[in-house]
Amino acid sequence: MSQRPRWDRVILKLSGEAFAGQGGSIDGDVIAGIAKEIVEVRSDLGVDVAVVVGGGNIWRGLKGAGRGMDRAQADHMGMLATVINALALQEYLEQLGQDTRVQTAIQMDRIAEPYIRRRAMRHLEKGRVVIFGGGTGNPFFTTDTTAALRAAEIEADAILMGTHSGIDGVYSDDPRTNPDATFLPEVTFLDVLNQGLKVMDSTAITLCMDNRLPIVVFDLLTTGNIRSILEGQPVGTVVR
């Protein structure tokens, strides 16, 4: 190991849209790049890495509900989409020699383990990357909330929240539409809730605040950012 990492165990939250890249619903080059970074921080820094993957590149429950679908049904479809992404990431990680387990909140034992907290922690202790699919297993909850819940359950030290739109952290407004938006290197959980800052949904933020779980919001698609964060460099925005 090159140095002591900033945190020993983290949850990496990946949006499904990040997996799409420029190549459709699943861009193998994008996933391969993310997998390479995960393997490097796992092997070089010895950090325990668990991953929560969204499914927005394939299906979003809110989109279906907005078109008249039953919200619970639409959300269950979204949970299945996250499992597809989890299996894709698992494949690219294992091509690089990284031992990996996918655990799902909805039982589907032909392709993944059921989520069991103690088993997930044991996998991490053995150097495996654990990928959580299927959300929380319940409709009306986002994968942001899944990341906060799983982080608290597996005793993670922080959540690394990767963005995919070229935005490198939290701003006072959307920098894509407001050129006067100000970059915020550090904010509090209460700032996020009171000012409506775009970090995670309010349920996830409250859960992180209650469990004193810092969040780092950063540009996922800038190569090396995951490692830089874990080495303590000032990348992105820290919410705590």
Image (cartoon, rainbow, N blue to C red):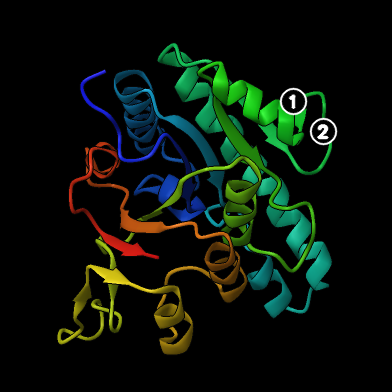
Q: Nearer the viewer, residue 20 or 111?
A: 111
- Structural crowding at the residue carrying mark 2, measured as other residues with C-alpha within 10 Å and reported as few (<14), some (14–19) or many (≥20): few
Residues tagged 1 and 2 counted as in contact (Cβ below 8 A): yes
Task: Check residue 160 in the rendering and tell me which mark sits there, or answer none.
Answer: none
Q: Residue at x 36, y 35 (%)?
A: 34
Choose top left, top right, bottom left or bottom right for residue 166.
Answer: bottom left
Q: Circle 1 sits in a helix, a strand or a loop, which is it?
A: loop
- The quadrant of the image that shows the C terminus is bottom left
Q: CA distance from mark 1 to mark 2?
A: 6 Å
Please give the residue where the numbered disc 1 appears in the rendered image.
111
Residue 173 position within the rendered picture, expressed as x and y whole percent measured from the top left: 29, 84
User: Is 210 rendered above or below residue 173?
Assistant: above
Q: Residue at x 57, y 48 (%)?
A: 151
Residue 30 position within the rendered picture, expressed as x and y whole percent measured from the top left: 36, 38
In the rendered structure, the answer to whether residue 240 lies left or right of residue 125 reads: left
In the rendered structure, the answer to whether residue 228 lies left or right of residue 212 reads: left
Choose top left, top right, bottom left or bottom right for residue 68.
Answer: bottom right
Q: Residue at x 73, y 53 (%)?
A: 136
Q: Circle 2 sits in a helix, a strand or a loop, which is it?
A: loop
Residue 24 visible, this angle:
no
**Count of numbered circles on the image:** 2
What is the three-letter code of the residue carrying label 2? Met
Residue 138 position within the rendered picture, expressed as x and y whole percent measured from the top left: 80, 58
Please give the residue where the numbered disc 2 appears in the rendered image.
108
- The quadrant of the image that shows the N terminus is top left
- Structural crowding at the residue carrying mark 1, measured as other residues with C-alpha within 10 Å and reported as few (<14), some (14–19) or many (≥20): few
Residue 230 visible, this angle:
yes
What is the three-letter code of the residue carrying label 1? Ile
In the rendered structure, the answer to whether residue 238 lies left or right of residue 60 reads: left
